[in-house]
């Protein structure tokens, strides 16, 4: 029966133009969820949380799974699967992105929603954690098909979406145009002008300056602070970045502008490597002229090709995984030569790999800290939408930088005080705040 179900799923995926490895997708989602749960449980045990409270904090509040029948451009009907998970709303509305990717399944979304809870808590934002996604390959869909898919997803999620309930944002393979379609679909159904219902929107319809660069800016800022504390001058720093998209692209640009040597970068089409430093302005110009914004076909003789997996093990000072989850595993953790890893992606390091890295003395700046810049600026945009105000780029950058550095300092102090890793220290702060909120809400026999 199990084999038959897998075959049916595979057939449905192919009908929708999504030839994917169902088993690999399920394993990936489960690993992310298992690792997120293990990180929470480690913090809960360290904090001595009551078992009942621990169960409350670990269990998602609400989950929604929907079928999305879409008329394709050729007239056929394809059915896509969509998800939204609200892990916690104890500290505020659920907050989290929407991703379009063939790996999306319920377990993956559950794990990502939990990470958002702890990320928002760590940065002391008035949010809980949520996440959503649609299982599809957007590269196989036209703009009109993506628009119809987004509108169908927004309409299906309408019962649990709202500026005081759950506020989506862009994530993997979604952008400000997707958010514009989503917002328009919600307002068409409700008849209410509510720009705070989503963040990551275009400036023309209530977006905020600096949102696109925010996650990458935060990653770059934390990376530079780690280098400073290690006594490594920026001009001497050698950095490898896996992923050259929305997050990795901005991270690379900011670090290169600061004087760092970017020795390796990669995207879905391959990678480039030069131990003496890549010509980032020339590479950026190439990607801007590429039909899909990719590195493939880069003509420079100043770089040699490198695979995304190989990039993680090059000789450098900092490795920044900025692609998808599950990139650093037991298979390659022992080969990583960089003394510092800054996690720009969500869940790029598996739990078993994390233990290997700790044993080897490699410092890992965890995802819930390093990539929090995006949700911080989404918070600014949400405030802007609720209040009808306008923020300047200078205001956004200054406040983002301050909040990121304050959180980084708090994590460092907790790690030193309790002699634990940066990851556990971050979770101790984040879980502790949510646990306190839960306890206060449930006191006095209510």
Image: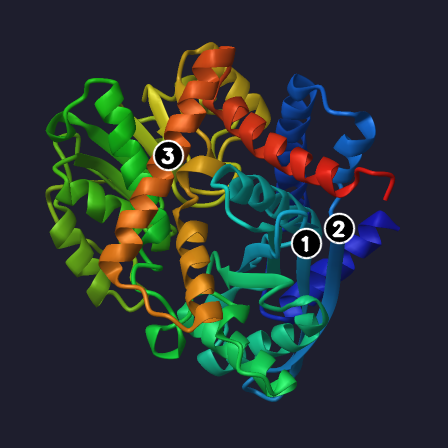
Q: In percent of the image, x 57 and y 55: which residue is there? A: 95
- Which residue in the protein does label 1 denote? 86
- In percent of the image, x 51 and y 37: which residue is there? 122
Residue at disc 1, secondary structure: strand
The answer to the question of whether label 1 and label 2 lie on touching residues, with beta carbons closer than 8 A, is yes
Position of residue 217 measured from the top left corner of the image (x, y, whole percent): 30, 47
* Left or right of residue 211: residue 417: right
**Reading the chain from its start, which is encountered first: label 1 or label 2?**
2
What is the CA distance from the residue labelled 1 to the residue labelled 3?
Answer: 27 Å
Q: Earlier in the sequence, mark 3 or mark 2?
A: 2
Q: Which-is-in-front pick, marks 1 and 3?
A: 3
Q: Is residue 202 above or below residue 54?
A: below
Q: Quadrant of the C terminus?
A: top right
In the rendered image, which residue does mark 2 sit on?
Answer: 61
Residue in the foreground of this view, choosing between 283 and 148:
148
Residue on which disc 3 sits: 406
């Amino acid at each position: 029966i199990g084999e038959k179900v897998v075959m049916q799923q595979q057939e449905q995926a192919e009908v929708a133009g999504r030839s994917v490895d169902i088993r690999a997708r399920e394993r990936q989602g489960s690993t992310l969820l298992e690792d997120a749960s293990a990180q929470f449980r480690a913090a809960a045990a360290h904090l001595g949380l009551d078992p009942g409270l621990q169960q409350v904090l670990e269990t998602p509040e609400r989950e929604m799974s929907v079928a999305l029948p879409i008329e394709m451009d050729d007239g056929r009907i394809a059915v896509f699967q969509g998800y939204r998970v609200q892990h916690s709303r104890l500290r505020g509305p659920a907050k989290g992105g929407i991703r379009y990717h063939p790996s999306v399944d319920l377990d993956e979304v559950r794990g990502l929603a939990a990470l958002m809870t702890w990320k928002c808590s760590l940065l002391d934002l008035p949010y809980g954690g949520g996440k959503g996604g649609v299982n599809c390959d957007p590269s196989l869909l036209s703009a009109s098909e993506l628009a119809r898919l987004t509108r169908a997803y927004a309409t299906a999620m309408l019962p649990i979406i709202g500026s005081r309930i759950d506020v989506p944002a862009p994530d993997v393979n979604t952008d400000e145009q997707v958010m514009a379609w989503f917002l328009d679909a919600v307002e068409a159904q409700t008849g209410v002008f509510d720009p705070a219902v989503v963040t990551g929107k275009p400036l023309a319809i209530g977006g905020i300056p600096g949102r696109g660069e925010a996650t990458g800016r935060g990653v770059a800022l934390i990376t530079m602070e780690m280098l400073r504390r290690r006594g490594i001058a920026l001009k001497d720093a050698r950095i490898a970045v896996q992923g050259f998209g929305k997050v990795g692209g901005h991270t690379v640009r900011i670090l290169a502008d600061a004087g760092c040597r970017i020795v390796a970068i990669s995207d879905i089409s391959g990678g480039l490597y030069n131990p003496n430093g890549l010509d980032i302005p020339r590479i950026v110009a190439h990607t801007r002229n590429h039909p899909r914004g990719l590195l493939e076909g880069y003509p420079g003789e100043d770089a040699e090709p490198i695979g995304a997996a190989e990039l993680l093990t090059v000789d450098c000072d900092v490795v920044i995984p900025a692609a998808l989850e599950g990139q650093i595993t037991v298979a390659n953790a022992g080969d990583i030569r960089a003394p510092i890893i800054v996690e720009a992606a969500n869940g790029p390091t598996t739990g078993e790999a994390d233990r290997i890295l700790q044993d080897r003395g490699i410092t890992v700046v965890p995802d819930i800290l390093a990539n929090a810049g995006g949700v911080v600026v989404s918070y600014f945009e949400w405030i802007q939408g609720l209040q009808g105000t306008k923020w300047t780029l200078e205001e956004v950058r200054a406040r983002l930088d301050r909040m990121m550095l304050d959180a980084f300092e708090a994590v460092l102090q907790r790690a030193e005080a309790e002699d634990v890793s940066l990851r556990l220290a971050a979770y101790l702060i984040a879980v502790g705040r949510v646990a306190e909120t839960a306890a206060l809400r449930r006191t006095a026999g209510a």
